[in-house]
Image (cartoon, helix red, strand yellow):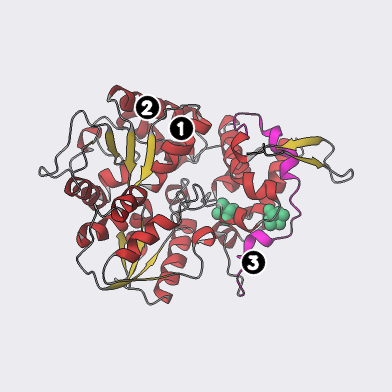
């Protein structure tokens, strides 16, 4: 295959950009460089406002929960770009309010999908994260709620104020674990302590398929809630302890039912923290779709339900996984899958991620209600996702049982 040529961009004088730079391919981007690295990329933003709406559809629905609540340009990507440029070039000084603006964002990256400037489309997520890290270094971040749960994660390895010794309380005695298995089910904190039915269903599905797997009782928080709130050094410590636990147990493959854990283990550990663990990481639907296609997994019980599917940001836009959950749902007998208007790369965020649910309740509730209303508009009986954090967010925000919420693992378990 011919080697892909790097794009040479000549920046025009008079627009504040003066250097010739070589734009790296996405995977070559060095996330550990100083923020100045992003300065010329950021300044390419033309402040056109396209990142406020899904411009590809005829009705141009809104797409940025933060901007809709903040109601000021600083809360949309265009404004964040300008602030990033001004802060990194010394034209503005960091302050508590500046930090708040960068934390008032679900890091859903729906805005980046609307921007047609390739460097912003590809890399804006990197500088939005880098600005959080910088605000922590400057002493203005993270938000008090993030500090509180991080202290608990450091002691008990979960952000839910729960005891580490209770992590496996949900595990039914009939599920057979294999002590020396090469496959681990990484449960994650939300399924361990809040949405235990996701963990139980996943373990029971794997057990019913005869998969030899183990759950490592010393599994720690994957670090995502710590990393996504700008505390990369603390998150790296969690990542290192998890990788040690996997390596000591001889794990070669990890299955996870959580979108946040999936992104952390598969992408953040090697690419941000340099922990090249070499372990295959699969999100549950990816693992099960293979089993379904080779007829090891048989879905035979009809569920007779019209459903709609919500793409979690951490497996969708962050990792590009859109189809496996849909393919599985369509193969469950009696399931009719209808799409919401904003789906796949244009999906509206559930409002729980990146520390928003703990730090910015108004923004979080607004995003959840908007998604629930959109789901109700499809006339579906249930809103289905494949992330326990999205599920928990929907369950906490659905009023008067107007629509049900499920994780895909719960439906698969019922259909076996
Ligand atoms: S980020 Fe892109 S879409 Fe948004 S204002 Fe800037 S150029 Fe326009
Ligand atoms: S990441 Fe999501 S919440 Fe943040 S600016 Fe972009 S669209 Fe808005």
Label 1 to label 2: alpha-carbon separation? 9 Å
Residue 333: name its quadrant: bottom left
Q: Is residue 197 above or below residue 368?
A: above
Give how far across and how far down residue 126 sits, in percent: 60, 41
Quadrant where ligand 1 appears: bottom right
In the drawing, what numbered circle is on residue 243? 2
Label 2 to label 3: alpha-carbon separation? 42 Å
Q: Which residue is mark 1?
A: 269
Q: Secondary structure at mark 2?
A: helix
Quadrant holding the C terminus: bottom left
- Can residue 97 be seen here? The reply is yes
Q: Is residue 70 above or below residue 279?
A: below
Give how far across and how far down residue 321 sits, in percent: 46, 52
Give how far across and how far down residue 140 sits, in percent: 57, 36
Q: Which residues are magenta?
A: 29-58
Verify whether residue 289 appears in magenta.
Answer: no
Q: Residue at x 43, y 54 (%)?
A: 312
**Neighbour class for label 1 at 10 Å: few (<14), some, many (≥20)?**
many
Q: Which residue is mark 3?
A: 55
In the drawing, what numbered circle is on residue 228? none
N-terminal of the pair, mark 2 or mark 3, is 3
Residue 43: name its quadrant: top right
Q: Is residue 415 left or right of residue 174?
A: right
Q: Nearer the viewer, residue 166 or 296?
A: 296
């Amino acid at each position: 295959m011919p080697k892909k040529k790097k794009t040479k961009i000549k920046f025009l004088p008079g627009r504040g950009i003066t250097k010739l730079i070589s734009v790296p391919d996405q995977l070559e981007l060095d996330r550990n460089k100083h923020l100045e690295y992003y300065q010329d990329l950021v300044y390419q933003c033309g402040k056109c406002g396209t990142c406020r709406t899904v411009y590809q559809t005829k009705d141009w629905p809104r797409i940025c929960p933060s901007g809709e609540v903040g109601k000021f340009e600083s809360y949309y990507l265009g404004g964040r770009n300008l602030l990033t440029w001004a802060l990194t070039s010394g034209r503005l000084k960091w302050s508590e309010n500046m930090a708040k603006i960068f934390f008032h964002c679900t890091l859903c990256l729906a805005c980046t999908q609307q921007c047609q400037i390739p460097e912003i489309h590809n890399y804006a997520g990197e500088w939005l994260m880098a600005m959080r890290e910088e605000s922590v270094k400057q002493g203005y971040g993270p938000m008090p709620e993030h500090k509180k749960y991080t202290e608990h994660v450091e002691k008990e390895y979960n952000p839910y104020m729960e005891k580490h010794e209770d992590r496996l309380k949900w595990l039914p005695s009939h599920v057979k674990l294999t002590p020396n298995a090469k496959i681990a089910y990484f449960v994650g904190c939300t399924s361990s302590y809040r949405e235990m039915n996701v963990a139980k269903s996943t373990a029971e599905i794997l057990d019913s398929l005869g998969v030899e797997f183990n759950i490592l009782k010393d599994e720690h928080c994957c670090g995502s809630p710590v990393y996504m709130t700008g505390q990369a050094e603390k998150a790296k410590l969690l990542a290192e302890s998890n990788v040690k636990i996997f390596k000591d147990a001889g794990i070669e493959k990890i299955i996870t039912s959580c979108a946040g854990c999936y992104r952390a283990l598969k992408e953040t550990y090697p690419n941000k923290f340099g922990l090249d663990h070499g372990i295959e990481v699969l999100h549950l639907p990816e693992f099960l779709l293979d089993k379904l296609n080779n007829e090891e997994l048989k879905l035979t019980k009809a569920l007779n339900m019209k459903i709609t599917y919500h793409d979690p940001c951490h497996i969708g836009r962050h990792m590009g996984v859109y189809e496996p959950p849909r393919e599985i749902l369509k193969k469950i007998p009696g399931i009719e899958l209808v799409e919401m208007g904003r789906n796949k790369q244009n999906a509206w965020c559930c409002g729980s991620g990146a520390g928003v649910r703990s730090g910015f309740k108004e923004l979080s509730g607004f995003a959840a209600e908007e998604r629930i209303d959109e789901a109700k508009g499809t006339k579906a009986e249930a809103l289905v996702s494949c992330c326990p954090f999205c599920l928990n967010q929907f369950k906490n925000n659905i009023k008067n049982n107007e629509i049900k919420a499920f994780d895909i693992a719960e439906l698969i378990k019922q259909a076996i």
